[in-house]
């Protein structure tokens, strides 16, 4: 039984691949340029090319779609990438699991779960909502595994990693794009990957959305204070006002497109994952203190 991971070179795809290899599974790690975990079959493919994607997924029983593109290319590239991933799963007769985010919901009350109506407001939110519905209407079993902001070794580009843990690892001041005393669910990359593997293996997951488990929700200030305790440094964070973020977006393409997601940072963002644990049993999530320590160690290793 071959598990294929599309986008295995970094982030959640890399971690899913690493864990599958550690479990002794047969894994085909698909990327454009390599950098996959040792022990996985290293396959190069262009997911924007349907024939290439179909070829990469041959013989698969489960296909994890974990590839992503920059914000600025979402509208242009994601529809084609998702359609090609569906075609690849259909050709192989495989199940497709999407490493999804929570954008589809738009502004929501807290806490929110999988039954919360999707009311996307911004362009990227509407795109993710439409693509999710398209995937769930495919002719193969599809799972949408939705996770809140994650951090962890390999989590390049994550907000809690880049704004909080990376600066602290280097002895610098952490900051945040919004108020600090707002609760926000942060997930650990390793836990998110394990949850998605479970969803890929269990037929009870098929055909619907699942929120992957995370450790307890803290306010941003509490999360930063805990991170400071872990690194042995009093963390004095500062919050960037929305207007400053808008100005930054003019010069940094990584920040562009975040304006429509301001509600995720200025209001409580509390993700309910009760349905997952009720169905599949408790997932042993990593306590924040341990997860932060491992992430800081990883950042320091990169800086050395």
Image (tube, rainbow, N blue to C red):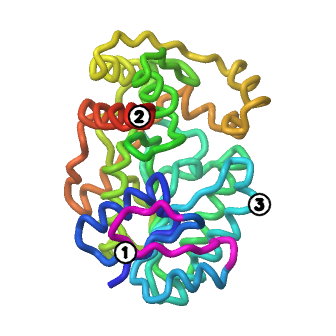
Whether the residues at callouts 3 and 2 have beta carbons within 8 Å, the answer is no
How far, Cα to Cα, is label 1 from label 2? 27 Å
In which image quadrant can residue 218 be found? top left
Residue ID for mark 2: 299
Look at the numbered discs 1 and 2 and tell me whether their residues touch, using CB distance below 8 Å.
no
Q: Provide residue 284's location: percent of width, then percent of height.
A: 20, 49
Label ID, residue 27: 1
Please state the extent of the stretch shown in magenta in the rendering: 34-49
Q: Would you say the magenta stretch is mainly helix, strand or loop?
A: loop
Question: Label 3 vs label 2: CA separation?
Answer: 32 Å
- Mark 1: which secondary structure? strand
* Distance Cα–Cα, label 3 vs label 1: 29 Å
Label whose residue precedes the other's in the sequence (3 or 2): 3
The tag earlier along the polypeptide, 1 or 2, is 1
User: In the displayed structure, would residue 177 be above or below residue 158?
Assistant: above
| Mark 3 crowdedness (10 Å alpha carbons): few <14, some 14-19, many ≥20 | few
Q: Quadrant of residue 46?
A: bottom right
Circle 2 Cα neighbour tier, 10 Å, few/some/many (<14 / 14–19 / ≥20) = many
- Which residue is farthest front? 304
Indicate which disc residue 208 carries: none
Residue at x 63%, y 37% (from the top left corner): 261
Q: Earlier in the sequence, mark 3 or mark 1?
A: 1
**Residue 70 visible, this orientation:** yes
Question: Which of the two marks, 3 or 1, is nearer to us in this view?
Answer: 1
Residue 88 percent location from the top left of the image: 56, 82
Q: Disc 3 marks which residue? A: 76
Residue at x 56%, y 25% (from the top left corner):
266
Residue 135 pos. (x, y %): 57, 71
x, y percent for residue 72: 74, 48
Mark 3 lies on a secondary structure that is: helix
């Amino acid at each position: 039984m071959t598990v294929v991971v599309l986008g295995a070179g970094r982030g959640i795809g890399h971690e899913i691949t690493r864990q599958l290899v550690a479990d002794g599974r047969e894994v085909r790690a698909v990327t454009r340029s390599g950098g996959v975990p040792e022990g996985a079959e290293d396959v190069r493919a262009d997911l924007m090319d349907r024939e290439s994607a179909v070829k990469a997924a041959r013989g698969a029983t489960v296909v994890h779609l974990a590839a992503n593109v920059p914000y600025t290319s979402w509208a242009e590239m994601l529809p084609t990438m998702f359609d090609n991933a569906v075609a690849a799963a259909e050709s192989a007769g495989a199940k497709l699991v999407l490493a999804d985010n929570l954008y589809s919901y738009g502004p929501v009350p807290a806490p929110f779960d999988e039954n919360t109506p999707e009311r996307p407001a911004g362009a990227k939110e509407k795109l993710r909502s439409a693509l999710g519905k398209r995937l769930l209407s495919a002719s193969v079993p599809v799972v949408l595994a939705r996770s809140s902001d994650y951090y962890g070794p390999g989590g390049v580009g994550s907000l809690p990693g880049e704004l909080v843990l990376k600066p602290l690892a280097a002895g610098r001041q952490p900051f945040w794009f919004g108020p600090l005393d707002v609760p926000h669910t942060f997930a650990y990359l390793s836990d998110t990957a394990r949850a998605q593997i479970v969803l890929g293996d269990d037929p009870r997951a098929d055909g619907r959305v699942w929120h992957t488990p995370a450790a307890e929700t803290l306010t941003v200030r509490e999360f930063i204070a805990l991170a400071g305790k872990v690194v042995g440094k009093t963390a004095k964070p500062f919050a960037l006002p929305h207007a400053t973020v808008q100005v930054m977006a003019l010069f940094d393409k990584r920040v562009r497109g975040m304006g429509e997601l301001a509600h995720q940072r200025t209001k409580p963002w509390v993700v309910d994952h009760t349905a997952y644990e009720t169905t599949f049993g408790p997932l042993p999530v990593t306590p924040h203190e341990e997860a932060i320590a491992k992430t800081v160690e990883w950042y320091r290793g990169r800086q050395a």
